[in-house]
Amino acid sequence: MSVLAMTGLVAIGSFAAGMLGALTGLGGGMIIVPMLTLVFGVDIRYAIGASLISVIATSSGAAAAYVREGYTNIRIGMFLEVATTLGALGGAYIAGLISTSAIAVIFSLVLAYSAYRSFQPREEHSIDGPPDKWATRLRMDGTYPTAEGLQAYTVHAVPTGFSLMFLAGILSGLLGIGSGAVKVLAMDQAMRLPFKVSTTTSNFMIGVTAAASAGVYLHRGYIDPVLAFPVMLGVLAGALTGARVLAGAKVRALRTIFTVVIVFLAVEMAYKGLRGGI
């Protein structure tokens, strides 16, 4: 395959990954890394480096639209970003100490767990019960637009969400995924935010988290501009398209797409990692 053809295919695959990442809050990296390693045979550390650049592009492209439309909770995002940035620096350091096969197996476990947790049924609007005292003190409660008008919501379990965000940061630096899946699950399940608020706030956060760990990968020479450039352009175009589609999207459909894709990638990554093929 010529370099030009491979660049085109990488850009097309990145477009699809960016669109799905924007719709689900994954940030594209959850699909980019397996795609580059499993389909194109790229070394996983270079795939992670390109993925981190694409995650920054995804966040930049989609976050502005979500903030303007009133979905994103900026106060929650800025508060939780403290934990994810510290975790990302630690994860990027760990990535240089373990084998690529171990990274692939860890990646598959994260994918499988994310698929399991994301498809657990729960109510969309959790406005029952008193809000967390930290949420009240930091004025995190908010509203988001629905077909019936603005819907109010309260925030719960802030300390638990903050702890999970530190873990999300470690996984971001280690796997180059932006940890959108863990962030969405922490806000959706633990802090009981509406799903669309969780996904859009995750998109707002992942760029900062990825930038922290991308600096470490750049210092180690794992960011190749020839690979990162088409990935970044494809993901950015996909993220902008996904942001336009989100307002009319069905939450159950998003969860179904999310689960099917990452289960498939989890099986492939585990198989390749255990065989030592990555």
Image (cartoon, grey):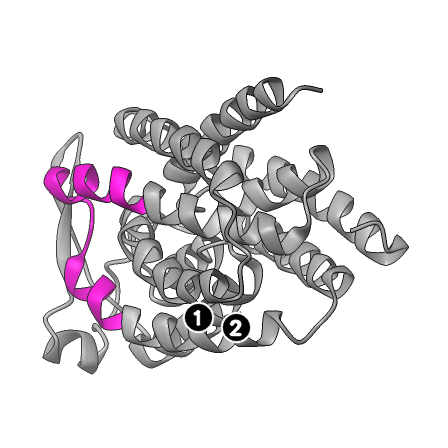
Please state the horizontal and vertical placement of residue 261, each as a whole percent of the image: 61, 36
Residue 91 disc label: 2
Please state the horizontal and vertical placement of residue 275, each as a whole percent of the image: 89, 53
Q: Quadrant of residue 108?
A: bottom right
Please state the horizontal and vertical placement of residue 65, each as a whole percent of the image: 18, 37
Position of residue 246 in the picture relative to residue 95 (left or right): left
**Magenta stretch: dominant SS?**
helix
The kind of residue tagged 1 is Ala
Task: Report the span colored magenta.
Answer: 59-80
Q: Nearer the viewer, residue 180 or 195?
A: 180
Q: Residue furthest right?
A: 275
Q: Nearer the viewer, residue 29 or 152?
A: 29
Asked whether residue 224 is in view, the answer is: yes
Residue at the location (35% across, 49% down)? 56
- In terms of secondary structure, where does tag 2 sit? helix
Quick check: is 165 in the magenta stretch?
A: no
| Cα distance between the residues tagged 1 and 2 | 5 Å
Task: Name the quadrant of the N terminus.
Answer: top right
- Identify whether 170 is placed above or below 128: below
Query: For the residue carrying disc 2, how many other residues have a C-alpha within 10 Å: few (<14), some (14-19), or many (20+)?
Result: many
Residue labelled with disc 1? 88
The kind of residue tagged 2 is Gly
- Identify whether 5 is placed above or below 18: above
